[in-house]
Image (cartoon, coloured by chain):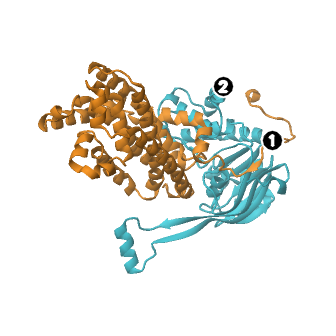
Chain colours: A cyan, B orange
Amino acid sequence: MTDDGQYSSDTSIVVDSVTKSFTLRYHRTAKQVAVALVRGHDISDTFQAVDDVSFTVKQGESVGLMGLNGSGKSTLLKLIQGVMPPDSGTILTRGRIAGLIATGAGFHPQLTGRENVYLNAAVMGMTEQWTARNFDEIVEFSGFGKRLDTPVGNYSSGQYARLGFSVAIHIDSDIFLADEVLAVGDKPFKEKCIEKMEEVRKSGRTLFYVSHSAGSVRRMCDRVLVLEDGKLGFDGDVDEGIRYVKYDEGPDDRPTDEELGADI
Amino acid sequence: MADTLPLDGTGATPSRVVDAPLAPPSADQGLVGVFKRRYLLRLLVRREISARYQGSVLGLAWSYVNPLSQFCIYFFIMGTIFSLHDSIPNFAIHIFSALIISHYFTETLNAGTRSIIRNKSLVRKLAMPREMFPVASMLVSLYHVFPQLVIIVIAALFYGWSPTLSGFAAFLIAMLLMGVLGTACALVCSAANVFFRDIGSAVGIMTNLIRFSVPMIYSYSMVDERFGRFADYYVLNPIADAVMLFQQAFWIPTISDAKLAEQERLPGNLLELGLIGLGVSLVLLVLAQLLFNKLDDRIPDRLT
């Protein structure tokens, strides 16, 4: 299954004409379906969440993925992470992937924070010994204290996100996927995250960063991809990319980044 | 802080050489992938055991209350009102041995069917073989079998039970048979339940049917007597075979003339039937895996 020969040895992610569609079902029960058929309504519809997207990323590159809500960013990230396979096309990755899809990635609400840290690390392929060794550092970074032994269902969304980010960033991965990680954190934590991600970037790990904040993309990334309705609309320079999504149209009459809380 | 992190270079040179092949990110799928990642499986099993009765006062005791209550109902209603105590010697052991092994199967099936939906917060966001969840359900059910085995051994000793080699073989075959068949059914139902929640309700009814399709509250000799030729089809049910294998292990040795009892009260080729059932179950497990693979790709889309 591996296609090594075709790509150079420093290729980290290959996405080759990848398509993923979702089926929307309007009716579920047999009765609803029957009624819809009689009336001639559609009973289902498909839409292309990711539509024929191709690009390759080199090891150590830091890529910002931008686009409006619903443009397919999270779906693309899920495909790269391997949560679901594409309908057609190929995705290849090299090495261990860590990351979080949306906030509070894959936590089980009934488990305590401590158990979730172990579970999350195990899913990303880390051993029990590794987690035990790095546990204190993960917890310290997340800023959690004694609440770690209560089920995460009781946590606030900010706390949820912090713990998730903390686990993912500490994993010794080769590729780090971050999906709007800074959306819910408070300002001191955001700054901590940015610092940590710069550290990750400098260590040569591939960084794949989804964000709506032009400032942090500019600071963090050396390449921008823009998705538009599932299609790859732009691939290239950071400043051009940000201009392309029009997140940078100046402070004339629009609310500034600072007002929107998307600073740094 | 970075000391514990094995970073290649904290300087400005991003040179990390990754010694791994380019591969699809969703590798290591399937039951094989599950057993490659035993540590993760262990965590899930432990989680399931502690979470199943979370927030209840009796906790783990509930998994004994349920079979115990069934035992009492069958023992008194069937035994006393329908006076089965007279026609089936050591009726208590007869019921309880049947209850343990059939409960193992139905618990695997029931918990397995709901397993993927119950864990949807993980399934939707993390990459791991989704077969993990039904397999973990089977292992959790297996975990609950052991204390029940202790109870039946003590009870059987009270009735004059002594272990036999053929009984031990029968016990092992029965456990394997129900483990493999239960995993196969749980795999298919867990995936199908994501697409049609009706499966969960249907499985509930199946559980009820299973309870009465095995010689628990009646004996095999009654089936043999009353149905005649039909008894040959009755023993084609692997769950009934597993129950009778369990009875051969725990119930037959408690009857005073065990040899005669075995001939009279169980089918003659029981071990053979069990082994054939095991073979068929292994084939079913492979088929279940193939069907699961077909459904698996769409599971994250459908879990909303």
Name the residue beneath numbered marker 1.
Answer: B19
Chain letter of mark 2 equals: A
Q: Residue at x 34, y 46 (%)?
A: B235
Task: Specify whether A186 is left or right of A221.
Answer: left
As shown in the figure, which amino acid type bears the numbered disc 1? Asp
Residue A8 - label: none
Residue at 76% x, 60% y is A55
Chain bearing tag 1 is B
* Discs 1, 2: same chain: no
Question: Along the horizontal axis of the image, is B161 left or right of A130?
Answer: left
Decide if residue A264 is in sight here. Answer: no
Total labels drawn: 2
Task: Look at the numbered disc 1 and give the secondary structure of its residue.
Answer: loop
Q: Is residue A1 visible?
A: yes
* Residue B57 x, y percent position in the rendering: 32, 28
Q: Nearer the viewer, residue B133 or A68?
A: B133
Residue B3 % position (x, y): 76, 27
Is residue A229 left or right of B120 when viewed as pictured?
right
| Label 1: few (<14), some (14–19) or many (≥20) C-alpha neighbours in 10 Å | few
Place of residue B74 in the rendered image (x, y in percent of width and height, measured from the top left): 21, 36
Residue B242: x, y in percent?
A: 38, 39
Residue picked out by circle 2? A133
SS class of the residue under badge 2?
Answer: helix
Residue at point 62%, 26% (across, down): A132
Q: Amino acid at mark 2?
A: Arg
CB contact under 8 Å: marks 1 and 2: no
Q: CA distance from mark 1 to mark 2?
A: 24 Å
